[in-house]
Every structure is written in structure tokens, then in C-alpha cells.
Amino acid sequence: MRYPAGHKDRVREQIVRAASRRFRRRGGEGVAIADLMRDLKLTHGGFYRHFRGKEELFTEAFLASVDQARQRMITAADAAPPGRQLEAIITTYLSAGHCAKPDEGCPLAALTTEIARHPKGTRAAFDRILHTHAAAFARYMPGGTSAERERLAMVLFAGMAGALNLARAAADDELRRAILEQARSFYLDALSPA
Amino acid sequence: MRYPAGHKDRVREQIVRAASRRFRRRGGEGVAIADLMRDLKLTHGGFYRHFRGKEELFTEAFLASVDQARQRMITAADAAPPGRQLEAIITTYLSAGHCAKPDEGCPLAALTTEIARHPKGTRAAFDRILHTHAAAFARYMPGGTSAERERLAMVLFAGMAGALNLARAAADDELRRAILEQARSFYLDALSPA
DNA sequence: TGTACATCAGTGAACGCGCGTTCACTGATGTAC
DNA sequence: TGTACATCAGTGAACGCGCGTTCACTGATGTAC
């Protein structure tokens, strides 16, 4: 073969990684296959050696970015002192840094609205990753059964994603800052074991 | 003139109303001017007698739908018994009916993510309507100064919008129902004057 | 009162552009014999 | 070992389509005289 063993897999991974960033920054319809491939020093024709089409890439990139975001967030949580992991999750998620970098940030914030408009197959994959995601965070949540804590994690992340999106939409820096701060104190209060 | 007085204003209003529904259902890039005009038994060329372009329509339709959503929500709140208005806001917003009808529902849920990707002019208009919106709901919020209650209203609506979007993205009906229910009890608890 | 002209919301063909996808081709390497 | 052929990731022209926008035109009514 022309290329060394593993070459194709590496290229595919690069496409997925680059796509996951672009999708988060610009949304599904704001990303062109040709631009994406050009960034990787490739041409658009080769794309179809790796994916059936754009929808497949979107789904795969979304799933990959959820996994990546989860790992980062759990790393941040576990770096916190015992008993303060949930606090670390909330303050990290609702930080100015996360707000300023949608392309490296939580794909639930950047893409959930449009996933609601995607075909059912994509949304079924969404259900599964959402479950995986929430299950991983359930242990940081207060409350009853693990199923309850899992649902609470879903609602917490959904709520924080909503606040992050609102902050990102704000044109005024001071308004953005105020939204993030208010959201941090709201979710910290709401989930403190009072 | 060919058309009676007030005709142009009425047509413009119809365009804005139809657009606001389509934008909420399909997103900004999912709406074609020609389709929109065809629904109103008009042709696409006439659109430019009313608007400078699609961006202007998007902004105007968004603002109009926020006003409309606010009026509906305040009507629902004020129909509740005294002391239970906030509860009415939360249960109405997070109802299965609202979840099932994005085109008639809250534009903050349907469009905030993509507004974050719009030009600064659009986002400045967003800041103003957000302020108006939150100020109108501040009186239902618990807590200190009116500025604090206003920011709390922003965070509450952002959070509920996040939960609504998550529920809309879910492919499974049971998951959708569970997200809405968990979100209702979470926000009710968090804001009950405990 | 009648006639010529101006107005302007709406029409629909046409333009230009972006973009997803297809396809014949390339060329380096692997394999068969 | 050498030669002919197969493989296949990547190339880039081309196709088809949707869509935002422009523009010359229509025709009913208002206005000037």
C-alpha cells in the first residue's frame, strides 16, 4: 500500500478532531467539508474514503467531543479536595475561560439545540451518550438513588449549558460576566447539601 | 396606490410572525426566504420591499417572538393563585406541551446558541431584549435587590431553556419525560423560599 | 370631469455563490507468480 | 530475484442543487393639471 499501516486511522481521527472543534464553534451548517479537509492539507474528495457523508461525521464528532469534555471535567473534579468536587465542576463549567472557547468546550452547550432538529438515528446516539455522560457524574451529585443522581446530573449540565449559551450570546462583557457569576452561585447554592 | 392603507404593514407583520415560527422550528439556516413567502401566497422578490435582508428579518422575528413568549408566560403566571406564580412559570415552561412545540415556544431555548454566532449588532439587540425580559420576571423571583432578582430570572430562564433543549434532543419519549420532570422539581426546589 | 403621469407592492426570471457529493484518475507499495 | 498486476488513500474537475439577492416589469390606484 501507498501509506504506512495505521495511516488511514490516524487521518480519520484527525478529521474527527478538527470537525468536532469546527462544529462546536460554527454549528453543523457552518462547517464545509472542503474547508475542514484543507485545514488538514487534504482535498475534499478524500473525505468520502473515511465517511459516508457529513451527517456521519457530525454524529461521530459530536460523540467524540462529549467523551473528551467528560474526561476533562472529571479530571478537574478529581483535582479538587475531597468534598469539593461538585464545586469544581460548577466553577469550571461556568468559568470565563470555558465561555470564551466554545470550540474546545462542552458540546452539549454548543450543539444540543440543533441535535433536536436532526434525524432520529442521530438522536438515539445522543440518548446513549447522554446516559453515559450523566452516569459518570452521578457520583458527584447529592441525593437518593443512583438513577436520581444521574437525572440530576443531566439537569445540572443542561442548566449550566443554558447559562453558558446565554453568556456567549451576550454582546456586553459585563453582562456576560454577571450571567456566569449569578449562574455559579445559583447552582452552587441549589446543590449544596443544605 | 394599488393596495389599501395599512396593507404593507399588515404583510410585514405576517412575514415576521411566520418567520419567527419557522426560525424557532428549523433554526436560522433552515429557513428559506422563498418558502416563507410562498406560505403567505407571495413570491420571494417582494421580500426586499420589506426587509434589507435575511439578517434583518431574523433579528426582528427573534425580538417579536421574545415579546410574545413573555406575554404568554406572564399571562400564565398571573392566572395562578397568589404566591404560586413562580411555580406556574416553571411548570408551564417545562411542560410536555412547550417541549413539543418549539415553533410556538420560547425563542431563548430555540435560538440562543446560534445568536452567539451572529454579528455583534444582532447580539446587542439581544442584550436589550434579555434585559427587558428578565426585568419583567424579576418581580416573581425571590431574593434581594431588583437587580439581583433580574439576574436570577436570567439564570432561571437560561437553565430551563437548557433543560427544554435537552428534552427536545432526546429520541426516547420516556427520557424526555424524565428530564422535564426532574428539571421541574429541581427548579421548584431551588427557588422555593426555604 | 377627464387625461396623463407617478407611485410602489408584488412578480418571476436570472445571477452568483457555496457546498455536498461523485468519479475518473494518480502513483506508491504490496502481492502473485 | 524480477515482472506484471492489484490495491486504495488521496486528487481535483465536474455536477446538481438550494438559496440569497437583484432587477426589469406589471398594473391598480393616487395625483397633477
Image: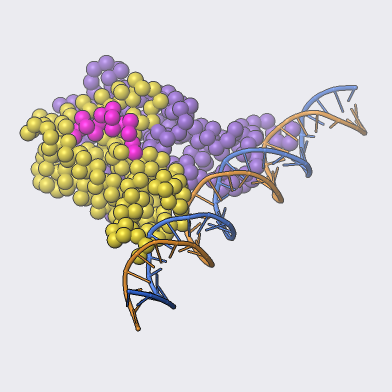
Chain colours: A yellow, B purple, C orange, D blue
Residue B158 seen in render: no
Residue placed furthest toward the top: B145
Identify the image quadrant of residue A48.
bottom left
Residue D17 drawn above or below residue B15: below
Q: Position of residue B105 (x, y in %)?
A: 40, 40
Q: Position of residue D14 (x, y in %)?
A: 59, 59
Examine the structure image and report whether residue B60 is included in the region drawn in magenta.
no
How many numbered circles are shown? 0
Magenta segment: A89-103
Give the residue at x 45% y 33%.
Answer: B118
| Secondary structure mostly taken by the magenta-highlighted segment of the chain | helix
Residue placed furthest toward the left: A82
Identify the image quadrant of residue B32.
top right
Residue A5 drawn above or below residue A42: below
Left-right relation of A142 to B43: left
Q: Position of residue D12 (x, y in %)?
A: 53, 54
Left-right relation of A185 to B1: left
Which quadrant is the C terminus of chain B positioned in? top left
Q: Position of residue B62 (x, y in %)?
A: 46, 34
Left-right relation of B175 to B122: left
In this view, the residue in front, A59 or A1, is A1
Give the residue at x 16% y 46%.
Answer: A136
Give the residue at x 31% y 42%.
Answer: A107
Residue A159 seen in render: yes
Left-right relation of B26 to D13: left
Give the residue at x 73% y 36%.
Answer: B2
Which quadrant is the N terminus of chain B positioned in? top right
